[in-house]
Amino acid sequence: MANRGVLMINVGTPDEPTVESVRNYLREFLLDPDVIDAPYLIRQLLVRGIILRARPKKVAPLYKKIWMAEGSPLRVYSDRIAEAVSELLDGIHIEHAMRYGNPSINYGLRKLMHSGVEELLLLPMFPHHAQATTETALKHAYKELEELSWHPTIIEMGHFQTDDNYITPLASSIEPHLDDDTHLLFSYHGLPVSHVKRIDRSKKHCQKVDNCCSISCDANELCYGHHCMETSLAVSDKLGLPSDRWSISFQSRLGPVKWLTPSTSDKVRELVGRGVTNLAIVAPAFLADGLETLEELDIGIREEFEEHGGEKLTVIKCLNDNPDWIAGLTEMVEGKFAPSVTA
């Protein structure tokens, strides 16, 4: 049997909650053409000339609000996930890395290479496929593998937006927070519309057909918006929630381009205006808690909700190292290795 290993890849985080560290992180993140896919000179001007001048000073205090004793929450929870899966997968080397920041993908790959790994599973920790997450993580991993001149047998996890190993723990984490009058809001990370339209090779479906994200077809097989809808439908079905008890929104916008709608902020205001006073928010695109959930939702959106007349808001924690999710993730990893084990 080949010596096997897994590299779990998350987005990234600053090393410290300081302006300088946040600036370094944002520079690497936002200059990635898979994140801001504007022409090179425009991207450089936008990021270096505008965003990096102001945003680090605004964002660093937000990180300070959520920083844990062990460090950045995203890194802490990613550590815990990797360690928990490693304990259940005897003989398989597990490392986690960040696409931007530390531990780097290069660092994780070198550790796996020096462990003698011959069969490598690349596992971007994103249930829903997107250019700005899955694609850039894989692209960078392959680039680093070439620079290391290391050529193990590669397996890719792929998207898993409706995999029961993900849906069941997610639904179970939500259920205790639902009362008879609770409205459930699925808040997904935002994405520029240009990213999802690019996936549609037919150029006839995305943003051109009514309820395009609710229809499964070849045109949106890899569409982020469609994947988010599939997750929401699968979870709401498992929870037995009727369509008027749940909604979808998108958070974390940056820049003047057109983003997927509705925004979480707009949706929360709309729901309160409709008389919703008991709201639960879950963020299924994030497998580990970080700035977007602990600050943007649990602090920022909570303030908006209360300011507009909402009474009870529950922000449901990400799956993190939830034992049910760890068991499900472990089964997903084993399933990817299974063909080579039985060969």
Image (spheres, rainbow, N blue to C red):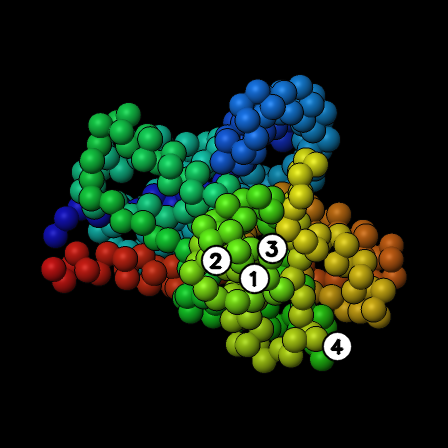
| Label 2 crowd (10 A; few <14 / some 14-19 / many >=20) | many
Is residue 174 shown left or right of residue 151?
right
Q: Earlier in the sequence, mark 2 or mark 4?
A: 4
Q: Which mark is residue 220?
A: 2
Above-or-below relation of 193 to 172: above
Q: Which mark is residue 213?
A: 1
Is residue 79 shown left or right of residue 256?
left
* Of the pair 315 and 232, the residue shown nearer to us: 232
Provide residue 139's location: percent of width, then percent of height: 38, 37
| Label 4 crowd (10 A; few <14 / some 14-19 / many >=20) | few
**Can you identify the residue that label 4 sits on?**
181
Q: Amino acid at mark 3?
A: Gln
Q: Residue at x 22, y 32 (%)?
A: 150
Q: Residue at x 37, y 40 (%)?
A: 138
| Label 3 crowd (10 A; few <14 / some 14-19 / many >=20) | some
- The kind of secondary structure element at disc 4 is loop
Mark 1–mark 3 Cα distance, whole angstroms, equals 9 Å
Q: Which mark is residue 327?
A: none
Above-or-below relation of 282 to 139: below
Q: Amino acid at mark 4?
A: Asp
Provide residue 277's location: percent of width, then percent of height: 81, 68
Q: Earlier in the sequence, mark 1 or mark 3?
A: 3
